Image (cartoon, helix red, strand yellow):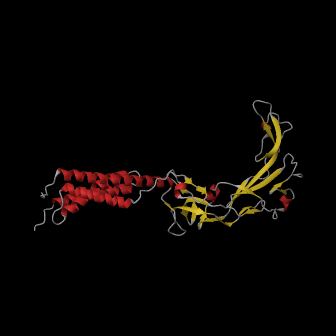
Amino acid sequence: MIARKPFSWGARIAGCVLLALALLLLAATERGARARAAAEDAIGGAVLTDAEPGPGAEGGLVLVGGTPEVVSLATDLQFAVTAKAPVLLRKVEMFQWRELAYGGAPPSYELDWVDHPVDSAHFARPAGHENPGAFPFAAARFVAPSVRLGGFALSEALLQAIPGYEPYAPGFSQLPPNLAASFQAVDGALVTSADPAAPRLGDLRVSWAVVPLQPITVIARVQNGALVPAVGSDGEAHARVQLGERSLTDMLPSLPDAPRYAWARRALALLLAWGGAMLLLGGGRRGGRDEIAALLLAAVPLAAVAGALWLGTRDAIAVALFVLAALASAAAMLRLKRPPARP
């Protein structure tokens, strides 16, 4: 066996304290990193906040903000209505009977604009309140074929996820002749009423709204140069879109912060453990064998603890750390069993 320098209980206690501090520091660092990694897995991966279009961003999860650029107009072909907007919405209403009943009182009936067919067969008193039935035109949403944000193309799913509409008054100069014969323009909408101020049962009103051009922020996957919803750990695709230019924390307030200076803290933990191991081994020997053995022994508990913390989140990393702990342990034992070099 190798003769070691005598050491005091004080050195042994100090060595244990340094080792404990190293393990606490490493555990705190790895728990923070693990929490961040688990949260990123839940949303589909780590988010790049300064990505630009190109091969480097392909397949990654990115945060992109700004005002969308509409390259191709959103178009309602049936009415020949276009808008320089990400999404164009067509609303169709018919002047119909509605049944009103409050607090058990006998129902009353009124004519009003309603955006869906009202089945008068279910009225308490249908006689004299019959509605025409199905609409000749359906409400619809029209997504612009080409919209870009920060140089990336926006997929239809993300465009559909942009919140908020505002009324849109299009020009009707291209209205098809068959529709021009039935409709007239009133306050930015089309109506079939002969007298718009006095609509009659069955009259139609068609109006439009748009998703306005305004700053937005999205978190999405880059796929063939386009931004698409990211698939999370639940297997569902999530379209994350918010109005305004937002930070990653604004978009994902529950995302834990990554540990600051993680690698510096890991290095400090290793130095503390190395110092603790040196004290427990009783100091160095000529040739530096004990210093190297102490370094190997210091790596064993650190790698084992880190591996245990990463289990279930990054199993490949955990296994690699366990293997490192085993190899460091074996190498340290072999080194300590070597006879000291002769002078």
Q: Where residue 7 sits: x, y (%)? A: 15, 54
Left/right of residue 128 with respect to residue 331 in the rendered view: right
| Residue at the image position 16 percent from the left and 62 percent from the top | 285
Measured as percent of width and height from the top left, residue 257 is found at 46, 55
Residue sitting nearer the eye, 70 or 213? 213
Answer whether residue 307 is visible to the viewer in this image.
Answer: no
Q: Residue at x 34, y 55 (%)?
A: 319
Count of residue discs: 0
Q: Given the current orientation, which residue lies at the most extreme left position? A: 343
Is the C terminus in the top left, top right, bottom left or bottom right quadrant? bottom left
Asked whether residue 269 is in view, the answer is: yes
Residue 210 left/right relative to 19: right
Quadrant occupied by the N terminus = bottom left
The residue furthest top is: 104
Report the side of 304 relative to 43 (left or right).
left
Q: Camera-side residue: 11 or 140?
A: 11
Measuring from the top left, give residue 294's x and y in whole percent: 22, 59
Q: Where is residue 292 in the image (x, y as percent from the top left)?
A: 22, 62
Residue at position x 15%, y 65% in the image: 286
Between residues 198 and 23, which one lies in front from this camera angle?
Answer: 23
Residue 214's quadrant in the figure? bottom right
Which residue lies most toward the front here?
A: 10
